[in-house]
Image (cartoon, coloured by chain):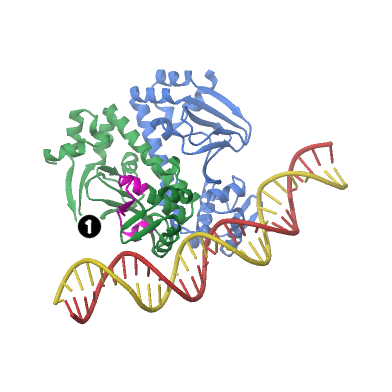
Chain colours: A green, B blue, C red, D yellow
Amino acid sequence: MPESHYPEVRSLHLFSEMGEDNYRTLMRGSYVQNFPPQIDLIHEGESSDFLHVVLSGSVDLFSQWNRRETSMATVRPISTFILAATIRDAPYLMSARTLEKSRIALIPSQDVRDIFDIDAVFARAIVRELAQCYRGVVKSHKDIKLRTSLERLANYLLRQQTRAGGEATFELPTEKRRLASFLGMTPENLSRAFKGLQPYSVTVDGNRVTIADADDLRTLAKPSPLIDDYSS
Amino acid sequence: MPESHYPEVRSLHLFSEMGEDNYRTLMRGSYVQNFPPQIDLIHEGESSDFLHVVLSGSVDLFSQWNRRETSMATVRPISTFILAATIRDAPYLMSARTLEKSRIALIPSQDVRDIFDIDAVFARAIVRELAQCYRGVVKSHKDIKLRTSLERLANYLLRQQTRAGGEATFELPTEKRRLASFLGMTPENLSRAFKGLQPYSVTVDGNRVTIADADDLRTLAKPSPLIDDYSS
DNA sequence: TGCTTGGCTTGACATTTATCAATTGATGCG
DNA sequence: CGCATCAATTGATAAATGTCAAGCCAAGCA
């Protein structure tokens, strides 16, 4: 990997505190690649040869079973995916494809495991990252088991609004069909769910969503930090 | 903690390889307690002061939101729970209660974090354990997003059969009401789902389940190692 | 401009799942 | 034993969600 790519990977929590020599060793075997949209990066069931780092663009993690498919998460810069598979040297549980033109760094899994063993700071960072990922999935799981589709959408919109800076109007960061899949419903039902939120001051125009009265929406959504706060 | 309790905790993957001195330090601040059934051990939202280890009995991890409750997992000996919260020093995302009379070891979270920093072997074990937990939740999440309730029950029964040694007849390890919650359905629906599996050679008598023709059931269940194999 | 494409929406309908009420059946207790 | 309790089951009904078919509409293109 050219040295010019070092800084942006280095800025990741996962790598920012580790020893310089170990970091260089990691980068030595790595490389950065540009991908067009809609390219399959990995497929569930394959062995995990590389830890992936999204430098720009975005990546959809999804799974399939019995001809059904569901979107599990979207990975945005700058973060990693399939860390758990890398650590355990186990098959991927999810597939990944680019959503848009993306730059991805690929770090050999064996190198990650090797450096983990000799760099305690890196090990600590990995554990924190993994624990964070774990808690993220637990929250998603609670979301889908405890809430109806309308409630999931309401909470999703409130989270997006926060992410977008709290303005009443903001853009959905993803196609509605993928959002529907992520929220565990069909595109048709997502349309109806948006209509179902009209009494709670939500209006939609294309990808532009307006929440006129967030407190009103919150009476329905009942957001909880133990489900909706992805930063803790 | 009395020394007599050391060996059974020590046998956990998490602790089996770490340095003896560090292990003793961990145990020094820990203690073991006996709990009757149906006792709340921790509640979601609380801060994570102790890593818990189930030595005997069993513990239900569950979550609540808006007066609804769902069972997330059952912890059986000998394993830990709320490792992620301990590592990140973050609030619990799940509550825990004993299902039966249980012996639980409590290890101060701060000690776990301290020893993690100075014992690379322990750190490696924690990472592996966490990665395992992470993959477990991902599998549960795929299960509930990709399958109908009938399919989830079918796969659950096949997993239990395997766990029970592969015999055609085996015991459900939990009450049906909790199983229903774990599988993301109501008790009423679980009853109906069992009936719906009769054409696939499944019969139920109380907690005793018989799968007369597992291959037949598999044509419906379509089990996948990427969802149903909790050992990888 | 007209055409095609694909995502989105809508309506009608089917399926799945939940809810409510009542009953059964096993268990424990005085 | 008789009674109370609670999980499990069953039936009737309602609500949520999915499926299918059709139409809309904006984007891209000849």
SS of the residue at dot 1?
loop
B128 vs B172: above or below: above
Q: Horizontal and vertical percent for residue B225?
A: 42, 51
Which three-letter amino acid code belongs to the residue tagged 1? Pro
Residue B189 in the magenta stretch? The answer is no
Q: Horizontal and vertical percent for residue B231?
A: 44, 43
Q: Quadrant of the C terminus of chain B?
A: top left
* Image quadrant where residue A51 sits: top left
A100 vs B18: above or below: below
Label 1: chain?
A: A
Q: Give the residue displayed 35% in from the left and 38% down from the top.
A: A130
* Image quadrant where residue D30 sits: bottom left
Q: In this figure, what is the number of numbered marks?
A: 1
Give B118 or B86, whichever is nearer the viewer. B86
Q: Give the residue displayed 44% in from the left and 51% down from the top.
A: A217
Q: Is residue A128 left or right of residue A55?
A: right
Give B161 or B55, whichever is nearer the viewer. B55
Q: Is residue B183 left or right of residue A88?
A: right
Give A98 or A89, whichever is nearer the viewer. A98
- Look at the image and give the residue range highlighted in magenta: A159-180
Q: Give the residue displayed 53% in from the left and 19% down from the top.
A: B1
Query: From this viewpoint, is residue B231 visible?
Result: no
Give the residue number, with chain letter if any, for mark 1. Answer: A37
